[in-house]
Image (cartoon, rainbow, N blue to C red):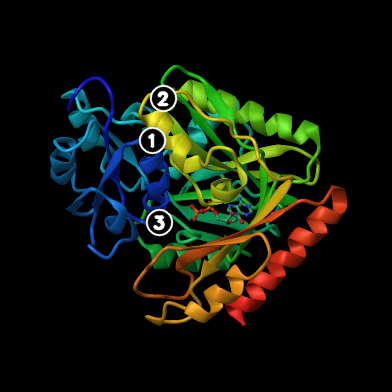
Amino acid sequence: MKNGMIKRVGVIGGGQLAWMMADAAAKLGVELVVQTPAATDPAVAIAAGKILAPVDDTAATAQLATQCDVITFENEFVDLKALSSLESQGICFRPSTHALFPLLDKYHQRCYLKDLGLPTPKFSSFPTPHTPHPTPHTPLVLKTRRHGYDGQGTFILKNQAELQATVERLQTVPLLLEEFVPFERELAAIAARSVTGEIAIYPIVETQQEKQVCRRVFAPATVSQEVVEQAEAIVRTLLDRLQVVGVFGIELFLTPEGKVLVNEIAPRVHNSGHFTLDACETSQFEQHLRAVCGLPLGSPAMHTSAAVMVNLLGYEHSTSDYQTKRQQLAAIPQAQVHWYGKTESRPGRKLGHVTVLLDEPGKKQHDSAIAIAQTVEAIWYG
Ligand code: ADP
């Protein structure tokens, strides 16, 4: 790898998150080289170079390193031990493997947060003598410790019988057990830290999940300043302690008592930050590349008073490109449709998203955002 100005960024993973870095890369004058398993993966089309290999193929990552100045991640399902040995040979990863070590296993991540004194749901590894549920009647949440995404690997269980059945089905996979948080809302923070330790936090957003999958994001979240301050304090502690370089997404629960708990840290750009592409002065993708390339961060401020982002999830097995629906969505005033160009649709698969900008004051704005989300979903899901 070369010293000096960064001209080529290697990205481990070639899904829609890497694909959405394309415009920012062009703007900053850097080229992307992706390591991703299939030639049909979204980011292959926008990359200057590609290595077709699984994201945990470290020999492929060593090859990637010969084609770029720095390596970053759009996917964390990597073999971190092997990458850290590449790092000790002088390959530059941003964020560094040290920042990722406490995060990739959900149990280790919870332990790390607890050690930092940051609030999380009560948890334990599983099997364990101490079940973390307050009463036998409250649900429990069982999670696979690694490789969970979009709710894959997260199970909300009503009772011990359901718990037993799920554990038997999962067999020997390492597990995390935690209390069910009866959250009032789910929030998320997208934030970046630069090489020099500068931190930029985007407006805190509200996320809405269905069946554990993100469906909509409202920016900014209509919460009190006190809640925003709790969330921002958590973000600053985390990014500073981990010495992060790049963008992180931090998923949060807001309890009925007004307390903010950390649900999960995603060490990369995140679905709850997609609104930044259309609604902020610097998108999360540009911000990430700025940080990774050692540039000063851009402003995370919104240039519109509010925005709503709706995911377009697959609802059938198909190879359609949904032209008609996409045209209908694009006709919504102030809407921007982002279509990831995937060749196959499957139920639950993220195929694209729509962001709609709003410019109305106060409570009316949130009502309008909800109505717009309903319109988008009525067009998409029919
Ligand atoms: P993933 O890694 O698949 O995103 P998460 O741990 O973020 O999994 O969980 C997905 C969703 O499941 C959350 O956004 C939330 O809606 C729900 N969930 C997860 N953990 C809990 C919990 N302890 N209490 C209540 N709901 C939870």
Q: Is residue 376 above or below residue 208?
A: below
Q: Mark 3 highlights which residue?
A: 16
Helix, strand or loop at label 1? It is helix
Separation of disc 2 and disc 3 at Cα? 24 Å
Q: Position of residue 64 (x, y in %)?
A: 18, 41
Q: Position of residue 23 (x, y in %)?
A: 41, 47
Q: Mark 1 highlights which residue?
A: 28
Q: Position of residue 9 (x, y in %)?
A: 28, 37
Q: Nearer the viewer, residue 124 or 24?
A: 24
Q: Mark 2 highlights which residue?
A: 295
Separation of disc 1 and disc 3 at Cα? 19 Å
Q: Nearer the viewer, residue 292 or 338?
A: 338
Query: Which circle's residue, 1 or 3, is located before the other in the chain?
Result: 3
Under mark 1, the amino acid is Leu
Q: Residue furthest top?
A: 196
Q: Quick check: marks 1 and 2 in contact, CB under 8 Å?
A: yes
Determine if residue 266 is in view: no
Numbered disc total: 3
Determine if residue 349 is in view: yes
Q: Quadrant of residue 301?
A: top right
Query: Which circle's residue, 2 or 3, is located before the other in the chain?
Result: 3
Q: Nearer the viewer, residue 7 or 140?
A: 7
Q: Quadrant of residue 366?
A: bottom right
Under mark 2, the amino acid is Leu
Helix, strand or loop at label 3? It is helix
Under mark 3, the amino acid is Gln
Separation of disc 1 and disc 2 at Cα? 10 Å
